[in-house]
Image (spheres, grey):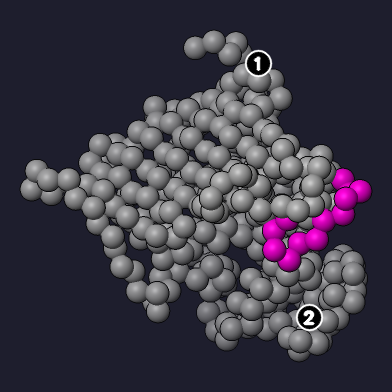
């Protein structure tokens, strides 16, 4: 069974699909690149020729009906994730869906339900869980080196990083939201994943649209349309109270008047603390009654975990997924509540064990 060749298809022929999915799946000896699909069939043809993929489609339903695939990557605008993923699952195909899993928790749950009904697997494309630093930190925290965790901070702030006014990223109908659903999914997910994804109690915060009037703060390589739709937030700041008693502060921005871009996760515990800032890992603890700073040097030539190899192994052997669809529901539930809290301008509480907003007083 392990030696089976996995027949692979790609849905969505954008830059992330090529850079991340094609460039990685093509290196695996047990994966055969069979088909590619994009509504812009010229984009699909271009990648098909470059990667020697024989079958090209402009309609994903046709591709999934005609080709006997084992696995597809879904790399489309967010609003199509649930529609395409559930259809692929109905055809008996495993799904590697780019983050976010869907535009909200209800849509994400539809994918989980379809997965459970078909017995197939769905993995969310949360690549930050697969870095050497994340793999190391996950084990370090699980071994209890931080003690009881009481505070977490996470963020991704850019100086000029709007993904182009008028692209699907700035259209709420297509993306589901702005920077919170785009960048927030990465580093808030990583922070909560590292501490075991505890159940949230409440969330509060606000969103801002500070740079929607300009096309000068775009991310490199992204062109803006001055007349394009921009009806999402470009900054999101919030606070989560967890059932464990720990708290989470977070901030995300596409554009900010700051010195330089920054990604970070900081976790504080009673025995130690860790920080991962712009990819640099540090540990803060105490040895021999002395405060010490430790900078682990992880071997960059050794990949501790490969996202794509991991998923194919899970398909073939039943190995447990590191980023299952259920985790996508967890994150979208938090994001849904955050958007509701920002709209109300008051904390919103979670009903324990349910994806539901409780209409409670904002007083504590």
Up-down relation of residue 107 to residue 216 (above or below)? above
Front in this rendered view, residue 37 or 47? 47
* Residue drawn at 78 percent across, 80 percent down: 47
Q: Residues within 10 Å of mark 2 (few under 14, many from 20)?
A: many
| Magenta span includes 134 | no
Q: Is residue 250 left or right of residue 171?
A: left
Q: What residue appears at the point 41 percent right and 54 percent down from the top-left corner?
A: 276
Q: CA distance from mark 1 to mark 2?
A: 49 Å
- Image quarter of residue 271: top left
- The residue where tag 2 is placed is 47
Does the residue at mark 1 contact the one at mark 2 (Cβ under 8 Å)? no
Identified at 73% across, 86% down, the residue is 51
What crowding class fits label 1: few (fewer than 14 Cα within 10 Å), some (14-19), or many (20 or more)? few
On the image, the x and y values in percent for residue 11 come to 78, 68
Classify mark 2: helix, strand or loop. helix
Task: Identify the image quadrant of the N terminus.
Answer: bottom right
The residue stretch that appears in magenta: 218-229
Q: Nearer the viewer, residue 6 or 280?
A: 280
**Residue beneath disc 1:** 359
Picture coordinates of residue 99, whole percent (x, y): 65, 54
Q: Is residue 62 above or below residue 80?
A: below
Q: Is residue 216 left or right of residue 129?
A: right
């Amino acid at each position: 069974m392990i030696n089976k060749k996995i027949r692979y298809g790609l849905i969505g022929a954008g830059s992330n699909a090529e850079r991340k999915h094609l460039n990685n799946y093509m290196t695996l000896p047990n994966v055969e690149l069979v088909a590619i699909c994009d509504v812009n069939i010229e984009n699909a043809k271009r990648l098909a020729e470059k990667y020697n993929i024989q079958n090209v489609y402009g309609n994903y339903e046709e591709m999934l009906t005609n080709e006997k695939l084992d696995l597809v990557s879904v790399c489309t605008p967010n609003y199509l994730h649930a529609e395409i993923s559930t259809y692929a699952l109905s055809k008996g195909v495993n799904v590697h869906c780019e983050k976010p899993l869907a535009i909200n928790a209800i849509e994400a749950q539809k994918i989980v339900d379809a997965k459970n009904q078909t017995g197939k697997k769905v993995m969310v494309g949360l690549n930050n869980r697969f870095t050497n630093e994340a793999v190391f930190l996950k084990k370090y925290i699980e071994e209890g080196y931080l003690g009881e965790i009481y505070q977490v901070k996470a963020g991704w702030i850019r100086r000029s990083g709007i993904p182009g006014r008028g692209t699907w990223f700035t259209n709420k109908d297509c993306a589901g939201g702005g920077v919170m659903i785009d960048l927030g999914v990465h580093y808030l997910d990583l922070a909560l994943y590292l501490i075991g994804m505890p159940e949230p109690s409440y969330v509060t915060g606000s969103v801002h649209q500070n740079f929607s009037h300009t096309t000068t703060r775009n991310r490199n390589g992204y062109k803006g349309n001055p007349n394009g739709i921009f009806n999402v937030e470009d900054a999101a700041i919030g606070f989560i109270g967890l059932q464990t008693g720990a708290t989470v502060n977070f901030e995300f921005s596409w554009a900010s008047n700051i010195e330089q871009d920054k990604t970070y996760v900081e976790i504080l515990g009673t025995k130690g603390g860790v920080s991962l800032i712009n990819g640099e890992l540090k540990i803060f603890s105490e040895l021999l009654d002395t405060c010490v700073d430790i900078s682990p040097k992880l071997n960059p030539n050794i990949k501790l975990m490969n996202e794509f190899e991991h998923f194919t192994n899970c398909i073939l052997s039943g190995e447990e997924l590191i980023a299952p669809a259920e985790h996508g529901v967890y994150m979208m539930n938090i994001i849904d509540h955050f958007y509701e809290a920002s709209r109300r301008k008051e904390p919103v509480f979670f009903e324990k064990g349910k994806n539901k907003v409780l209409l409670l007083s904002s007083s504590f």
